[in-house]
Structure formats: structure tokens, C-alpha cells
Image: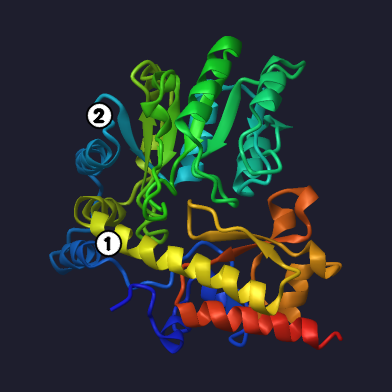
Amino acid sequence: MALLSVPLDELRRRTSLKWRLYPDDVLPMWVAEMDTAMFPAAHEAVMEACRIGDTGYPWGTSYAEAFAEMSAQRWNLELSPRGQIRRAGDVMNSIAAILEATTNPGDAVVINPPIYPPFRQVVSGYGREIVEVPLTADRRLDLDGLAEAFAGPATPRAFLLCSPHNPTGTIHTAAELTAVMELAQAHSVQVISDEIHGRLIDPGEDFVPLLSVPGGERAVVATSAGKAWNLAGFKAGLIIAGSEAREILDALPPMAQQSTGHLANLAHTAALRYGQEWVDELMVEVAANKRLFAAELAAKLPLVRYQPAPGTYLAWVDCSGLDLPDPVRHFRELGRVAFSAGSNFAGSHRQWARVNLACAPEIVTEAVDRMAASINDLE
């Protein structure tokens, strides 16, 4: 049975953000929640803990050990669970903690728009200044732009990397990441990488962890099992320091390592230890949905441009050919299908939409039918 086959009527019983923000007649394909049942081993770990009243505080390094085991098996990246990894809250709270440990209020931090909106929030919200180096037209890191920004008058102290990139789905190459670390070393910039989507990779594609490339030993990574196993409701993350950046772990704010819940720790550990094939199967379905979405748009809305990317389950869609003042609002109000507005990721992308394809194929088809019908109603 397909993982992305939970019936729509069952999905609508959920009370999470995705299913409650909009009315029931709106098809939600926006926030990054997946339409899957809970991974069985994670479910059993949580239920067993509840059965025996094991609902206290987290203990031990099992989560870090499970991640290190996966890292060695999947990416040939050896990590020390005790020496390099610390348990933390979710990824954005982890990034906030790393920024506090490595920068000061007023320091500049580089980001690559279009970018996951909390990147802006975590920088500005903690009193740091944003320096933008947009991705290139083909959605790659602009290495020349980064070199100019790192050496520029703002003298940034940190660079927030999103890997794989959200919303574009770009997977950065080893050569690109090596070049980033060379630039960072030359200009004393701390690289902080959000790798929460690292296991959400199309079949046949390879994810390159930043810590695996030359220079990566000086970087810090924030990650979690939450995205790949749909465990956002169980907040637990990991902060991982390169072998030459371990002092950053000691400089983290005092409470940074106290925000993981015990049940979350159990769920994430079980997912990492027993759920690798589950994610592999999931991404076969996601890749098929990407192809389906592209084909449906080409057939029914050819003015909407979408090029599938190998990372994440998110589609980055150019609606500028429709010449609508606000395409996402149009599709929501007239088509009754909700996407994430491109303007949230970059002011230059107001004609774009981010679409969540971690759903049943029937929902993908229904979404495009609703989009097309809403355009036809204007003619």
C-alpha cells in the first residue's frame, strides 16, 4: 500500500496547522506536513512509553547515536555522538542557538533567497542584519556573489545555508560546498547548515552533507528526523559540529540543549534506526508526484512553469505567465487550493508558489484541475 494514500476524509480529521488554517473546501498543499500515517516504529515507541508511564525527561545519547549510524551508512560520514552532536529543539531554534554562540547583535548574516521564511525571522529576530545573495537563475549557489558579500563592507560573521534548498529543491554539489567553505575560511565566516531535508532526495540522487567536504570540519549543522518522517509534532533536533568546530557546542546558550521532549527523542530515534527504507519508498512516490504534477500542468495550465528538482517534496512553481496580481491568493479564493506564497520566500518572487507534493496522486491531479478551472472561469 502506498505511503501517500491516507484518505482525504481521514486527513480532514487532523487538527494540525495544515488542515485547520483554511476551510474544509480548500485543498491544503502549502505547509510542509506530509499526508502519511505515522511511521510504525516511531508510533510504537511513543505508545509503549505512554503505556508504561515513561513520560519524563529525555536522557542519554540514543538520538545522536542513531543519527551517526545513519550518517555512516548513508553518506560515509563518521561522527562522534558524544563529541560532535548535541540534542536540541527544532531546527530553527537550534540555528538561533548557534547564531547566539557564533555571532553578536548587529553582526551581518548571509542568506540565499528565495529562502525558507524563518531564516529571515531568526536573523532579524535576534538582532542580526540580513545580507542577501540570491540563487542564480538556474537555482544554484552564486559563488561569486558569496565571495563579494563575504568580503563586502557588511563583513558578515555567518552564512546560513539551506541544504537541500527550500523552496527550490536544489541539491548542492560537493564542489559547490567545498567552494563555500574555502570562501568562509578566507573571510572568517561561520557556515551554519540546515540539513533537515537531507533524506528527502529523489531515487538515484545523492545528498552531500556539508561536514563531508573539505573544510566542512569547521561548519555546524542543524538537523532533525522531523521532516523526513513527518514528526514535526514531536520537537527534537540535533546540533552537529564539524571536528574543528566542537568549541561551538560548549558556547551554546545554556537552555539550547534542554528543549527536546522525551517522547520526541524516542520517536526520532526509532525513525532513524528503523525507517531508512520507509523514506526511500516515500521518495519513490514523491518523485512520481513531481512527474505527475509537471505533466498535469503542461497539459492543463501550460503558462505555469515547473521544473522538478531532486530535493525535498516541495515544488517551486512560476505562475508569472498567468499575469495574475496574486496567483496564490487567486488559486486559494477561486480554485479552493492553498499553496505557500512565493513572496514569503523572496520579495522578487511574488508570482511564484511553493506546492507540497507529499500527498496522494489523486490530490495532485485535483489541485491542477482546480487551478485550471479557476483560470478558465476568468475567460
Dot 2 or dot 1: first in sequence order is 2
Residue 330 in the image, given as x and y percentages of width and height? 77, 75
Front residue of this view, candidates 315 and 337: 315
Tell me what residue is drawn at x 63 percent, y 35 percent: 126
**Circle 1 sits on which residue?**
278
Q: Is residue 163 left or right of residue 117?
A: left
Tell me what residue is drawn at x 37 percent, y 51 percent: 204
Crowding near pointer 2: few (<14 within 10 Å), some, many (20+)?
some
Front residue of this view, candidates 295 and 224: 295
Tell me what residue is drawn at x 70 percent, y 33 percent: 133
Q: Secondary structure at mark 2?
A: loop
How far apart, in angstroms, are the residues tagged by discs 2 and 1? 23 Å
Locate the N terminus and report the quarter of the image it occupies: bottom left
Query: Is residue 177 placed above or below 120 in the rendered structure?
Result: above
Residue 116 in the image, given as x and y percentages of width and height? 60, 48
The kind of residue on which mark 2 rests is Glu
Front residue of this view, candidates 147 and 136: 136
**Circle 2 sits on which residue?**
78
Tell me what residue is drawn at x 23 percent, y 36 percent: 72
The kind of residue on which mark 1 rests is Trp
Residue 104 in the image, given as x and y percentages of width and height? 61, 21
Kindly tell me whether residue 106 is visible in this rendering: no
